[in-house]
Image (spheres, rainbow, N blue to C red):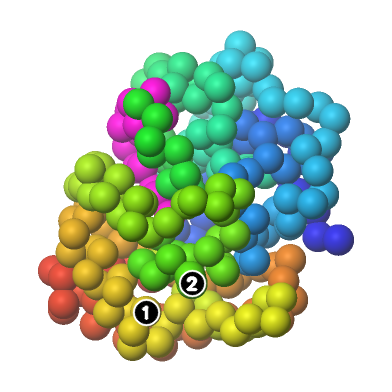
Amino acid sequence: MQRVLFHSTIFGPIHSRRLGTSLGVNLSPNDGKICSFDCVYCEAGWNAQGPGTTGLPSRADVKHDLEARLAEMSSRGQSLDVITFSGNGEPTLHPDFEGIIADTVAARDRFFPDAKVSVLCNSTRLDREDVRRGLLMADNCILKLDSALTPTMRLIDQPNSPSFSCETLIPQLAAMGDRCIIQTMLLRGNHDGHHIDNTTPEEIDALIEAYRRIRPREVMLYSIDRATPEADLCKVERPELDAIAARIAEATGIKIATA
């Protein structure tokens, strides 16, 4: 079974194809996965691997470990583009998410004031005011929308909540507006007897309409780059990705980035 990638709270720095030189923050356990989605393409594997034994890191431990790593990098003259919350699950599930973001912004300002703070979020907790406040403290609030059609979204992302839908999600994303960046994974394949393809004209038309409604600062389109827990998935190659991006940009006037 494919398993989690990160075995510490602070990891890296690594090179992110979307964000640059990134120091990662993992608010999930170091030996397990806690997520409100169970995405067919998740590089951290299926939720079935379990939450592990280490538990969630405390706010104090995150602050201590992050400050120590930033101080070390600064003393060595290393460069840093971004501090990125990603890791082995959904960061906004941490009960102290808002406070941790505040601590991170303060540490960034102290050690690497030109670096950005980014949060990769699956958008499932936008109904919580504390989560929204935390997200809005970040420079890059990167929110997931893999399909604007509920059946496809539920097939790709497999949300834990049976009531989670695009009809609920898209207005929540629209409330974030240009304070957010929308991230959309494009892929094809099969899972559990169902065909997946969110690149069809119907799918792209629905995404265009959703992006028009949301009016994000930017849309990030990307495809599979690493091993996936569902083996029967196909990457959308760069020329097609760029063609889809050009169509969306022309239809919406929104900046579209591909990776």
Q: Is residue 111 above or below residue 48?
A: above
Residue at image position (50%, 82%) is 197
Q: Position of residue 217 (x, y in %)?
A: 22, 52
Q: Position of residue 145 (x, y in %)?
A: 40, 60
What stretch of residues is rendered in magenta? 130-144
Instruction: Please give the count of numbered marks on the rendered protein.
Output: 2
* Foreground residue among 210 and 249: 210
Q: Amino acid at mark 1?
A: Glu
Quarter of the figure with the C terminus? bottom left
Question: On residue 203, which mark appears?
Answer: 1
In the structure shown, which secondary structural element does the residue marked by tag 2 occupy? helix
Residue 108 seen: no
- In the picture, measured across the screen, residue 35 lies left or right of residue 55, that is left
Question: Which of the two residues, 155 or 27, is positioned nearer the viewer here?
Answer: 155
* Residue at the extreme top of the image, as rendered: 60
Q: Residue furthest front?
A: 163
Quarter in which the N terminus is drawn: bottom right
The numbered mark at residue 152 is 2
Whether residues under marks 1 and 2 lie with C-beta atoms below 8 angstroms apart, the answer is yes
Quarter-of-image position of residue 184: bottom left
**Quick one: label 2, few (<14), some, or many (20+) residues within 10 Å?**
some
Secondary-structure class at tag 1: helix
Marks 1 and 2, the one that precedes in the sequence = 2
Check if residue 244 falls in the magenta segment. no
Q: In this rendering, does residue 36 appear at all?
A: yes
Residue 33 location (% of width, % of height): 72, 43
- Say above or below: 139 vs 229: above
224 in relation to 103, above or below: below
